[in-house]
Image: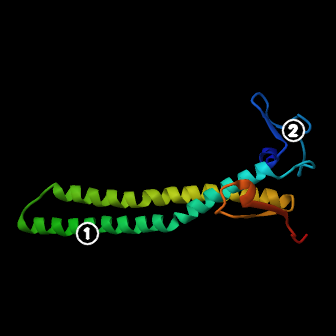
């Protein structure tokens, strides 16, 4: 795990545009092997935990809408393609040949593409949010911390409760 991930949650973090993140205690770049002996989880940690978990929950809440969109527009696209196939067959049997059938087929395919676009975006967003949440959870676990979050509270100081976890060794 990168040292900067530790500094992101620490309240001692200072930022300098020329050198980047600095430790507020030593005024130098963070330099430790596994864990920072002086890390302090409070305001920065609560804000980051709240931001990541709210984003993750927001993406999870979209799941039903995204799947509904996928199903609805995929069915519409398939119905248009099937109707186009029957229309093409009918025109062929009556002796007509028309480019309308190609247009109908293209519309059906574009509806299927329109069905999958939000689903692909959802899976990408979910993957990013899940990895960010895992990164923060793993970092807190390294320091034997855990948290509870109240999503109804807007202030991260109140919404996030950090506490020492009782993890088995």
- Which residue does the image show at 65% across and 56% down from the upper left? 154
Q: Which mark is residue 82?
A: 1
- Closer to the camera: disc 1 or disc 2? 2
Q: Nearer the viewer, residue 79 or 153?
A: 153
**In the image, is 132 to the left or to the right of 64?**
right
Q: Is residue 103 left or right of residue 33?
A: left
* Residue 126 x %, y %: 59, 59
Q: Residue at x 28, y 69 (%)?
A: 79
Residue count near mark 2 (Cα–Cα under 10 Å), binned few <14, some 14–19, many ≥20: some
- Name the image quarter holding the C terminus: bottom right
Q: Residue at x 79, y 44 (%)?
A: 4
Numbered marks: total:
2
In the image, residue 38 lies at what x, y percent? Answer: 92, 48
Q: Which residue is mark 2?
A: 24
Looking at the image, can residue 132 be seen? no
Above or below residue 125? Residue 69 is: below
Can residue 75 be seen in this snapshot?
Answer: yes
Q: Earlier in the sequence, mark 1 or mark 2?
A: 2
Residue 95: % across, % down: 6, 64
* x, y percent for residue 62: 52, 63
Q: Is residue 164 above or below residue 34?
A: below
Determine the residue located farthest toward the left in the rendered image: 95
Query: For the residues marked 1 and 2, what is the alpha-carbon distance in whole angstroms?
Result: 66 Å
Secondary structure under tag 2 reads: loop
> Is 70 displayed left or right of 31 in the figure?
left
Give SS at disc 1.
Answer: helix
Q: Residue at x 57, y 64 (%)?
A: 60
Determine the image quadrant of residue 139.
Answer: bottom right
């Amino acid at each position: 795990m990168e040292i900067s991930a530790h500094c992101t949650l620490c309240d001692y973090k200072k930022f300098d545009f020329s050198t980047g993140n600095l430790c507020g205690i030593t005024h130098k770049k963070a330099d430790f092997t596994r864990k920072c002996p002086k890390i302090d989880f409070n305001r920065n940690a609560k804000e980051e935990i709240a931001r990541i978990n709210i984003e993750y929950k927001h993406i999870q809440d979209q799941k039903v809408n995204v799947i509904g969109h996928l199903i609805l527009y995929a069915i519409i696209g398939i119905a248009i393609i099937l109707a186009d196939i029957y229309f093409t067959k009918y025109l062929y049997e009556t002796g007509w040949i028309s480019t309308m059938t190609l247009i109908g087929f293209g519309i059906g395919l574009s509806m299927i593409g329109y069905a999958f676009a939000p689903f692909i975006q959802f899976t990408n967003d979910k993957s990013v949010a899940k990895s960010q949440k895992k990164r923060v959870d793993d970092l807190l676990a390294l320091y034997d911390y855990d948290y509870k979050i109240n999503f109804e509270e807007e202030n991260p100081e109140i919404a996030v409760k950090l506490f020492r976890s009782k993890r088995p060794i």
